[in-house]
Amino acid sequence: MSIETRPTPETNTVESSSELIRLEQVTKRFGDNTVLDHLDFSVDAGKHVTLIGPSGSGKTTILRLLMTLLKPDEGTITVDGQRLFPASDKEVREVRKKIGMVFQQFNLFPNMSVLRNITEAPVTVLGMSKDEAAERARGLLEMVGLADKCDARPTQLSGGQQQRVAIARALAMRPQVLLLDEVTSALDPELVAGVLDVLRDIARSTDITMLCVTHEMNFARDISDQVLMFDSGRVIESGPPEKIFTEPERDRTREFLSAVL
Ligand code: ADP
């Protein structure tokens, strides 16, 4: 894991050989609003990295850049040594297969069964046989505690159940990276714990790399190898959760944590 942002040159940079995601000098503007300003940041394979910080500080924009839902104005992004930006459409399609994302709104296909929601992309994008995709989907549904919901429609499920299907759907593509964008923000409070428990399990029992934006600080503390504190599109502080949550160096981090904890 290494972090460096140009406006805070005192931030330490530690080079690493097992780097999976790398953003170099990434700038993203919306009109005259510079949301990310020459951001450098990398994530090692298998690590769980959480982005925290105030609303509007650019956290979701980073996930959306990695999902190629947005393009940077400047800079380079690579995943597993392959270019995601700048890159040809073909290169982007290849790299995208390595990345799964779970959104705030579950974005399931309402007209398909739960099982079909999960098998659709492995069959159409990866060319997996329907039988193999269905067998894997059943295994994933068991993992997220929904083995009995194969034939249900998403609308018959609670928000928490729908989000667990969305997690299974992302994992069905066997991604190397799982991006989690405030996945519990749209849920009723009593449904949050079930989703976070599933994610804790995945973090513990798989070697998938996780990049997570969350306001659930206890969850962040539990699963993260590294926590990055964002403010105004910059990483102002980073470190292991025990350091960031108990002895942050920056006043801004302390202020933010005291407001959310
Ligand atoms: P965070 O995830 O930290 O809350 P975001 O990455 O969602 O922050 O947003 C960072 C900034 O970018 C905000 O000022 C937001 O208003 C702006 N922004 C995000 N998406 C768009 C967009 N599609 N068009 C215009 N501005 C946007």
Image (tube, helix red, strand yellow):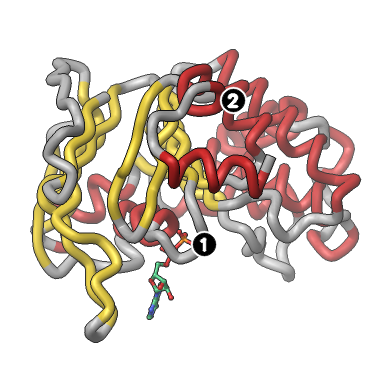
Q: As drawn, is 208 to the left or to the right of 260?
A: left
Within 10 Å of disc 2 (Cα), the crowding (few <14, some 14-19, many 20+) is: some
The residue that mark 2 highlights is 221
Q: Quadrant of ligand 1?
A: bottom left
Q: Residue at x 52, y 17 (%)?
A: 242
For label 2, the SS is: helix
Within 10 Å of disc 1 (Cα), the crowding (few <14, some 14-19, many 20+) is: few
Q: Nearer the viewer, residue 6 or 185?
A: 6
Q: Which percent across, then down, holds residue 144?
A: 74, 32
Q: Which percent across, then down, holds residue 192?
A: 79, 43
Question: Can you see residue 146?
Answer: yes
Q: Nearer the viewer, residue 64 or 54?
A: 54
Q: Residue at x 81, y 35 (%)?
A: 194
Q: Which percent across, then down, holds residue 138?
A: 72, 32
For label 1, the SS is: loop
Quadrant in the picture for residue 187: bottom right
The residue lying furthest to the bottom in this view is 31
The residue that mark 1 highlights is 55
- What's the CA distance linking mark 1 and mark 2? 19 Å
Q: Check the image and report above or below for 261 versus 152.
A: above
Q: Amino acid at mark 2?
A: Arg
Q: Earlier in the sequence, mark 1 or mark 2?
A: 1
Question: For disc 1, does the CB lie below 8 Å from ligand 1?
Answer: yes
Q: As drawn, is 102 to the left or to the right of 237?
A: right
What is the total number of numbered labels drawn onto the structure image? 2
Q: Amino acid at mark 1?
A: Ser
Quick one: quadrant of the C terminus? top right
Quick one: quadrant of the N terminus? top left
Question: Can you see residue 79?
Answer: no
Q: Check the image and report above or below for 27 versus 119.
A: below
